[in-house]
Amino acid sequence: MQGAFRLVTKAEQQLLDRAYTKLTGLPSILLMENAGKALADAVLSVDTAAQAAVYDCLIFAGKGQNGGDGYVAARHLQSEGLKVAVVDVSSGEAHRNDAAVNVSAWTKLGGEIIRDLTRVPTDQVPVIIDAIYGSGFALDRKIDEEAVHAFALMRELQENGSTVVACDLPSGLHADTGQVSSLSLKADLTVTFGRVKLGLITHPGCLYSGEIWLETLGMDDDFVDRQLRGDPAYILDAALASTLDSKVADDAHKGVNGRALLIGGSENMPGAMLLSIEACARSGAGYTMVRAPEEIIPLLAEALPSALYSAIPEGENKKRDLPGPLDSIAIGMGASDAGWIAKALSSLIPNEKRLLIDADGLNALAKMPQADELLQERREKGLEPPVLTPHPGEFERLAPELTSLLQEDRVGAARSLARKKSLIVVLKGMATVVAFPDGTVFINESGNSGMAKAGSGDVLTGMIAGNMAVLKDSRKAVLLSVYLHGLAADIALSDDDDPRSLLPEDILANISAARQTL
């Protein structure tokens, strides 16, 4: 996808490595050399206040290729005048292939290898490199006592002020799912090779990766795109978001900017609709129309008089036509368990060209026995995939068969549901996942912990509805809105603010500022 930076799985990176050496005729050890050199450069860039006693840098190196990268880094750091030692975490097993060559090179140069872990100092080491396990790590792997000891030493060094630089990814982090071992350290900086691994960006891996540096090893985007054929995953960042938005013409009018309808609300939760309505309008919809229970319309209209209001019909047989041709509809925000939701969904799903289902709309959909038939009818009519915006609890109600997968692999779960039901799935949470019916996924990098409050999702729903009306494209609108939603929260939260102080209203107030950065 133009403007998007592709993430890779372990298998995809292995394929890229093989293809690169085959195409270029260059030996694989050159990839290790470049990786280790990039690792050394990262260490040299670290600004640390810690004073070295004996060592400037300790490198904890395992027996595999990751450890081999560590030995290369040791050689380059020593050539720059740093006091370096490699802590051997191979458990006495012989290194193989390119790693063995670099262990030998380090030894021939007189480099120090610490094999007795009781000799490892645990303070006054400015930087440590975590190169024990690489992308081949499996969570069910039995970790031997020596490695457990090494993890404990690294943790103690970190607690005593050492900066942790991870080689390719923090040891114990699954390259594909982001799941982590209980032993894993949170790196300050991760230097990853070839392409950024999916597990570094998705939750919970993103909590452990720290700042990410990429060494491409000479693999440009064209090469990567030619080699990879599987379901793609991308970072949703500013570069991508800037390609999705449209410019507003000087002579634009409200009809051009689209008509959005928001359906929801209840006596107990009018605020959800208030947040969605304002977010929709601030996202540019020419007409923001609202259908809500009659008893809350005066409250909504007083707060936002620029929207157009009508009441949800009461009674089993009552019906009210939709207000003219619509460019987007969002339903479910703050609706509680009202009986009208299922009836409305039965009409909207097979007929409306752009539809978002959120909150209580999702709960109603999960209970509807005819949901699959309605979605199939929608597909057959060639309408755009409906957008579903679940948090994990709502996701489990929608797809209980995916509960285990959701707990192990957020990307895999969202992708599975999107593909199976032909949906656009916005799986909310840290590193929000957006999955499309063709298997393509995006992982959002904007946002912060202050967004973990009731109402933040209602703002997102309104933003998506508004942008769908403006852009006339559900896919673009979802990606743009998810990124801007998080960015608005980041702008609202200054460096000195406690994230707990952030309100959904603060996100609303910064939608315009976020958009202006693109």
Image: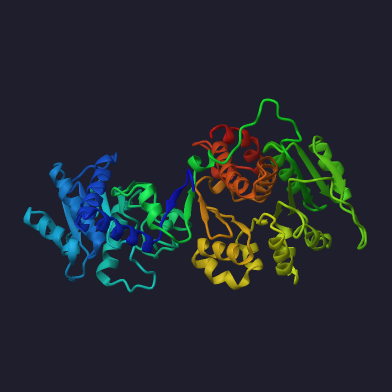
User: In the displayed structure, would residue 90 be above or below residue 29?
Assistant: below
Q: Nearer the viewer, residue 14 or 90?
A: 14
Quarter of the image where one finds residue 287: top right
Scheme by which the image is coloured: rainbow
Percent x, y of residue 425: 61, 58
Q: Nearer the viewer, residue 144 or 213?
A: 213
Query: Does residue 277 appear left or right of residue 147 in this picture?
Result: right
Quarter of the image where one finds residue 488: top right
Residue drawn at 12 percent across, 55 percent down: 106
User: In the displayed structure, would residue 258 be above or below residue 138?
Assistant: above
Percent x, y of residue 182: 40, 65
Query: Does residue 43 appear left or right of residue 486 in this picture?
Result: left
Residue drawn at 79 percent across, 37 percent down: 304
Percent x, y of residue 118: 19, 63
Please say whether residue 138 is visible from this viewpoint. yes
User: In the displayed structure, would residue 257 be above or below residue 222?
Assistant: above
Percent x, y of residue 134: 31, 61
Query: Does residue 197 appear left or right of residue 391 in this picture?
Result: left
Residue drawn at 59 percent across, 55 percent down: 428
